[in-house]
Image (cartoon, rainbow, N blue to C red):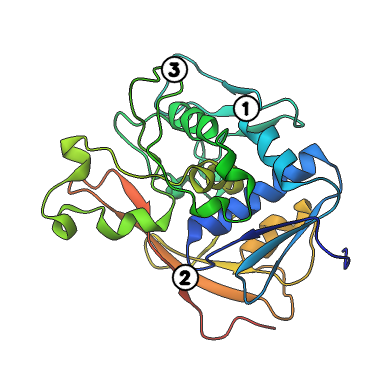
Amino acid sequence: MREFDPAITVRVDPTNPGQFFACCGLLELADRLWAGVEGSFADNDRQFHLHGNGTLNELVDAIAHAELKPTRPDDPYSTPFVVGRPFRPLSIDWWETDLTGAKDLKVWAGTMESYGIAAAMQQALRDERFRKPDLFDVGLVVMNAEEPEKKKEPYYYDARRSLNAHSRDTGFSVNDLGLTTTAFPAVEFLCIIGLQVARPAFTGETRVYDYFTWPVPLPTNLLLAASSGALALPGRKGYRFENWFRTGQKKHKAFRPAIPLPSSGV
């Protein structure tokens, strides 16, 4: 565990589960670019620190231009994909089997494409606005990576989208009408990466989960234990969220904002 000043700091809303798991994804990719990087939360969980070498600009640039390949090109809706060079290869396939303990965290369905959304969100990260500590707060309309004249909707991992996602909230169905809205690409792309290496804890209530921050620098091999609360760390904080159905057909889901757990420290 490293105690020196962080090389990279990003701003976080700890009650946004998409941002939390995006931090986990950011740490995993940083370690696959510069081996030995560690991560921690600070400032009442409003900041995420990466301890190691390198800059935020270098890291985001590498993520935005990384090799991204679907493993089943003939199955655009649910194919896993691989994040490759300049990173050590990382397969993103956690929704493929119940053995991962994460299958129920899949939010996309129907004609939504696992790889297509990832490619679009990744391409959006080439915008210079994502080179700053507030990259999780940069929102824009995302274009299709393969058909630039068309727009691409996100997974719905960023909890800000869930607030008006259901027809009873807006008076009409955004999904059914095929409307395009603002997405937060850094959160959407890095969250699906983070869910490969980190996991919330099951609460026993359907589609309700807990996740935990940690105040000391940790390496990536402790991400799963720390995020699920299995790693008892003094000063840790817990949050509870629901992965709820955002359409009447009960297929499409969205991460809702989390509430802090009353007592999470050890």
- Give me the residue at 41% from left, 42% from top: 140
Left or right: 114, with 69 as reference point: left
Q: Which x, y percent locates residue 47? A: 64, 66
- Asked which quadrant contains residue 35, the reply is top right
- Asked if residue 198 shows in the view, the reply is no
* Residue extending farthest left: 171
Amino acid at pointer 2:
Arg
- Identify the residue under disc 2: 240
Q: Which x, y percent locates residue 154? A: 39, 40
Task: Give above or below for 205 relative to 243.
Answer: below
Left or right: 108, with 72 as reference point: left
Mark 1 touches mark 2? (CB < 8 Å): no
Mark 2 touches mark 3? (CB < 8 Å): no
Left or right: 252, with 37 as reference point: left
Mark positioned earlier in the residue sequence (3 or 1): 1
- Identify the residue under disc 1: 82
Mark positioned earlier in the residue sequence (2 or 3): 3
- Front of the two marks 3 and 1: 3
Left or right: 231, with 92 as reference point: right
Q: Residues within 10 Å of mark 1 (few under 14, many from 20)?
A: some
- Asked which quadrant contains residue 9, the reply is bottom right
- Asked if residue 5 shows in the view, the reply is yes
- Give me the residue at 72% from left, 74% from top: 232
Mark positioned earlier in the residue sequence (1 or 2): 1
Q: Which x, y percent locates residue 187? A: 51, 48
Q: Residues within 10 Å of mark 3 (few under 14, many from 20)?
A: few
* Residue extending farthest top: 74
Distance from disc 1 to disc 2, alpha carbons, whole Å, reads 30 Å
- Give me the residue at 80% from left, 61% from top: 6
Q: Which mark is drawn over residue 146?
A: 3
Amino acid at pointer 3:
Glu
Distance from disc 3 to disc 1, alpha carbons, whole Å, reads 17 Å
